[in-house]
Image (cartoon, rainbow, N blue to C red):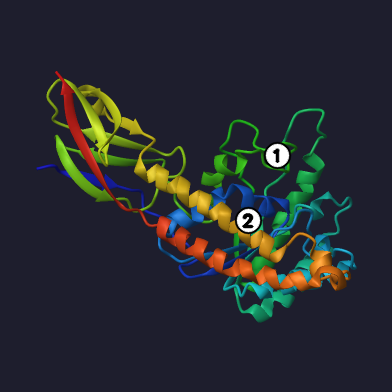
Amino acid sequence: MLALIVSVLAMGQLPLIAPGDRLAWIGGALVEQEIRSGDWELELTRHMPGAKLVIRNLGWSGDTVLGEARAGFGSPADGFKALVAQTIAVKPTVIWLQYGSNEAFADPLDIAVFRAQYEKLLDALAPTKARIVLVIPPPIEIRPSPLPDVAPVNARMERVATEIQSIASARGLGVFSLQQLWADVKTPQTTNGLQLAATGYRNVAPAFAKAVGMANAPEVEILMLQEGVQEIRDKILPAPGQSRIVKVKGLKPGTYELLVNGKVIASTDHETWAAGAAMTKGPAWDQSAKLREAIVAKNMLFFHRWRPQNETYLFGFRKHEQGNNAREIPQFDPFIEKTEAEINRLSVPVKTTYQIRKVSS
């Protein structure tokens, strides 16, 4: 009989988001552009399989805590009204506010004004009765010349971070910090210190997961004591590139292959199996990739739902020309709901068959 033990590092507590939550994630470019990657949302979703999370990305590039980037053809005050209305519209049970990056470029920085503006937004969102979490944004990543010295801005970012922490403490709100987002990566992750490169979200996803309180096990060890076949169900799906170490004890000399759901994944000698062989591909990784694809598809559907092209013609001062087409925008909703159901399904690992088979002496 095959004895198989799967040990996974315990997941951390998740006080910032819970099963069944409707999350409104609000901020500037770092938030908005995550919709094209999906990797940070993948971290949340795969750590909470079957949790039926609803995540609404309301990021807007260039935005401030007053919602000024959302003003369109209106005044800055209109931008603030839009920010509040957009948040209320998604009926959140939890709100993540990720502001302070753009404000830190002001020189001099009036920290009292920043706090007053943040407090104004918090008061405006209070009627949602959502759990509000303040996100401390990361500093600007240091990049070589010809990009400018970012030390002065990052010094102001430190003041912003301290003030956000103070606001959270005074109001009894949740808070998590992305100040160490770049700490564990050895290569540049942004194109200009602010905008993440194509693989940036994925590369710093473990740091993001750590910031929100999720324990990322670097390896999941599968210990097989002899030849045979066994079905297991993972606790969580692996992240892209995450390895699993397969150890097989007691094998006679020879070469053995590992089959996962009948497909050969790896082949090596008995000594390597005894020491542990890394596995970075298989059905679990395929499912994780499909989950990420579904997340990105949902994000894009929702983006076109809440920020449709030709918005001025559909809802603005030129709606007398094409406003009759506005009725099509709510037709995105069933597609979004269908994709979210698929996300929830894909987030739950399925049973997988592992087999060690001898191929030569």
User: With respect to residue 45, does 52 lie above or below?
Assistant: below
At a point 38% along the width and 57% down the height, the residue shown is: 348
| Amino acid type, callout 1 | Glu
Kind of element beneath mark 1 = loop
| Amino acid type, callout 2 | Met
In this figure, which residue is indicated by the disc labeled 1? 141
Q: Nearer the viewer, mark 1 or mark 2?
A: 2
At a point 73% along the width and 60% down the height, the residue shown is: 163
In terms of depth relative to the viewer, which is nearer, 163 or 208? 208
Mark 1 / mark 2, whichever is N-terminal: 1
At a point 70% along the width and 57% down the height, the residue shown is: 162
Within-10-Å neighbours for mark 1: few <14, some 14–19, many 20+: many
In this figure, which residue is indicated by the disc labeled 2? 300
- 230 left or right of 38? left
Q: Quadrant of the C terminus?
A: top left
Residue 358 seen: yes
User: With respect to residue 24, does 276 lie above or below?
Assistant: above
